[in-house]
Amino acid sequence: MQHTAKYLIHADVRTSGVVERSDVVGAIFGQTEGLLGDELDLRDLQDSSKVGRINVEIESDEGRSYGSITIASGLDRVETAVLAAALETMERVGPCKAECTVTDIEDARAAKRRAVVDRASELLTEFEEEVLAGGRLVDEVRKRARVAEITEYRGLPAGPRVQDSDAIIIVEGRSDVRQLLEHGIRNAIAVEGTDVPEPVAMLSRERKTTAFLDGDRGGDLILRELEQVGEIDYVAFAPTNKSVEALNREEILNALRRKIPYEQIADGASAREAFNPTDGGTVTLPSGDEGPSDPNLAADSSGVSITPKDSGLAQEKTQQSEPTVETESSSVESDGSPEATLQAADSPATHVDKQPDDTDHADGFIDHSTDHETPAEPQTLRGHVSAVCTEGSNRVRFLDSHFSLLEEYDADQAFEQLCEADSVPETVVLDGELTQQLLDVAAQRGVSQLIGTETGEYVKQPTNVRVRSASEFEVAA
């Protein structure tokens, strides 16, 4: 039966006296007999191999018995749930009063699917052959040599310089360490999940530490855990909804250049919003954060610089004044461009002051008009919230990932229009209450966040939709 099982029923049983395994099995058969009709009779189901053996583990302590029941089922989901509910009608085991509670119905096929995915990945890695062009052969050999250098630090995936470097980069998983190694960054260590291991916590207290995390909720959770068990000096994130392992060299270097000191993040603010400022961010980056234009020398306020290998004097001065992120330089043989070395300083080396911008206003609008012109459309999330969530507006706006307006409707059309929207919005701003119905359809369509003048009490709140009140933006509803 175990080979054909679709689901596993797990239940706990407690009795008022001492009983044995056979007593529990007998009580299950006896007290469910005739309860569910002939089609779901437990003995007939076992005879036809639709239900497997009833496994019972029972222990006794202080005159009472406690145990667990596991039953393999080849029935469909509905029939399995009915059978599981029938177990809870058991009131006695032998001479003793008993209570049975179903704790879980597990999909036995999910474990097989995970095994299939893992094995398929191994086979793909083992048999995949890459055709290399002659001009890229040296680069490919150098890249693979770096990846081969991945080591372990107290059982955790790490680069070879984590052991002796005075600065470390904390990432989420082994694949992130491998990706950084491919691009010459050799002092990264992985936490392998949201539960931060003690060795990483200790390292963060002893070294200058940069948390370089995925641009999703998982990255937020890891940072929150690191804050509680360790000490973080700098924070950097991959772009929203992207992981570190998916970034190319340019994106990795750009993110590390723009890292921000952790203490600059205001209480209650999202670290990702601070790193990638929308109007909810608390840290304003320098105006030149897209990266340097001069390939021979580049630096920004985060202390990350790209320095040519052949500029000996500049490199020597940099090494004397700033600790570096441990990297291995890589050259591009085909075009003869200079080798670049990533140097991430523990403290800012070159400050680029933000130029004053007369077009930024606290109300979230960019005003390029005169007194006689029509005000411009809001360009930030705060601006849209201010425009919609005012008394009597009775409107809803659909915004894309850059907070540009997609569509605008009457508030009472929010549910219908969201169901039928051809272009799924990233954000929905509503002058009204965010209902369970609207939250459910937002989760189904892939909306990232809902903002309304009021938030309700939800029976079920999906984790992939962020629910916010207009009051968070200091907008009077």
Image (tube, rainbow, N blue to C red):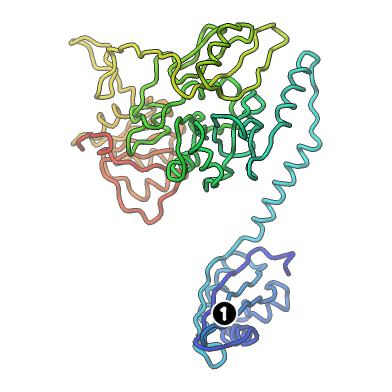
User: Residue at image x 51%, y 30%?
Assistant: 238
Residue 136 drawn at (x, y percent)? 76, 16
Q: Residue furthest bottom?
A: 95
Q: Examine the rendering and report whether any part of residue 445 can be seen.
A: no
Q: Secondary structure under badge 1?
A: loop
- Three-letter amino acid code of the residue under disc 1: Leu
Residue 427: quarter of image: top left
Total marks in image = 1
Point out the image quarter for the C terminus: top left
Residue 143 position, x and y percent, is 72, 24
Q: Quadrant of the N terminus?
A: bottom right
Residue 450 position within the rendered picture, expressed as x and y whole percent measured from the top left: 36, 40
Left or right, 128 with respect to 430, comes to right
Determine whether, in the image, residue 82 is placed left or right of residue 267: right
Residue at image coords 28%, 21%: 365
Looking at this view, is 296 or 67 the one in front? 296
Q: In front here: 200 or 436?
A: 200
Apparent side of residue 138 relative to residue 39 in the rendered image (left or right): right
> Looking at the image, which is closer to me, 185 or 282?
185
Q: Residue at x 68, y 52 (%)?
A: 113
Q: Quadrant of residue 36?
A: bottom right
Q: Position of residue 101 (x, y in %)?
A: 51, 74
In the image, residue 272 sits, relative to residue 194, either above or below, namely: above
Q: Which residue is mark 1?
A: 36
| Position of 440 relative to 358 (above/below) | below
> Residue 7 falls in which quadrant of the image?
bottom right
Label 1 crowd bin: few (<14), some (14–19), many (20+), radius 10 Å: few
Q: Is residue 132 above or below residue 210?
A: above
Report if residue 154 is visible in the image. Answer: yes
